[in-house]
Image: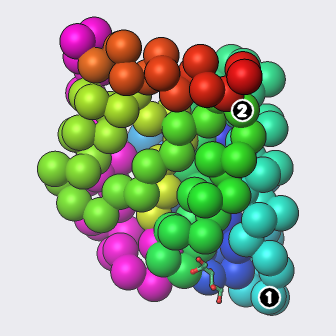
């Protein structure tokens, strides 16, 4: 199950991804926003992160204009590793090296067809255990 949220600037890309999920029988939960009326990206980044951390999700997707603000917001929630994805390489390495559990796209910077490619590369990539000690350092800092 994928959980997805965006602000107004990410709404169109979110709608495109949801169409792709529906066409490909990919289960998802949409946390809004539901139109292009201006909203604040922290509300959606934090909402998504808090929902993801409850458990039961394969990954979270956040989208704002650039993907930057909403990933910063999501990363404030303990246990979230949100990564801005903007290429095939960052899609692969976000999983392989960082074990990102939330991925972020820019609705104004990334085309739907590219976002779908990045999403599928991320989903097909496995985390490399040799990077675990770095993740552990982040986790240890979070509990301090
Ligand atoms: C909204 O105009 C825009 O600032 C927001 O979507 C995002 O790009 C922030 O990082």
Say which quarter of the image contains residue 3.
top right
Residue at 79 percent across and 36 percent down: it is 51
Residue 127 horizontal side relative to residue 66, left or right: left
For this orientation, the residue located farthest to the left is: 89
Q: Secondary structure at mark 1?
A: loop
Tell me the number on the disc at residue 115.
none
Q: Quadrant of the C terminus?
A: top right
| 38 over 6 or under it: above or below | below
| 62 over 3 or under it: above or below | below
Q: Position of residue 132 (x, y in %)?
A: 35, 14
Residue at 52 percent across and 69 percent down: it is 68
Please name which of the two marks, 1 or 2, marks the residue nearer to the observer: 2
Visual colour scheme: rainbow
How crowded is the residue under tag 1: few (<14 C-alpha within 10 Å), some, or many (20+)?
A: few
SS assignment for the magenta stretch, majority: helix
Toward the viewer: 16 or 122?
122
Mark 1: is the Cβ under 8 angstroms from ligand 1? yes
Toward the viewer: 5 or 81?
81
Residue 33 seen in this snapshot: yes
Q: Secondary structure at mark 2?
A: loop
Q: Position of residue 74 (x, y in %)?
A: 67, 50
Tell me the number on the disc at residue 38.
1
For this orientation, the residue located farthest to the front is: 144
Say which quarter of the image contains residue 99.
top left
Q: Which residues are magenta?
A: 106-130
Q: Position of residue 16 (x, y in %)?
A: 50, 66
Tell me the number on the disc at residue 78.
2
């Amino acid at each position: 199950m994928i959980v997805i949220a965006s602000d107004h600037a990410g709404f169109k890309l979110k709608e495109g991804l949801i169409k792709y999920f529906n066409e490909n029988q990919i289960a998802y939960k949409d946390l809004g926003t539901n139109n292009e009326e201006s909203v604040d990206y922290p509300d959606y980044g934090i909402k998504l992160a808090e929902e993801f951390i409850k458990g039961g999700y394969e990954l979270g997707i956040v989208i704002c204009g650039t993907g930057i603000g909403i990933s910063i917001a999501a990363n404030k929630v303990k246990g979230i590793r949100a990564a801005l994805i903007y290429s095939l390489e960052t899609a692969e390495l976000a999983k392989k090296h960082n074990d990102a559990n939330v991925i972020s796209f820019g609705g104004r910077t990334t085309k739907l067809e590219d976002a779908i490619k990045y999403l599928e590369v991320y989903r097909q990539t496995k985390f490399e255990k040799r990077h675990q000690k770095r993740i552990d350092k982040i986790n240890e800092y979070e509990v301090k």
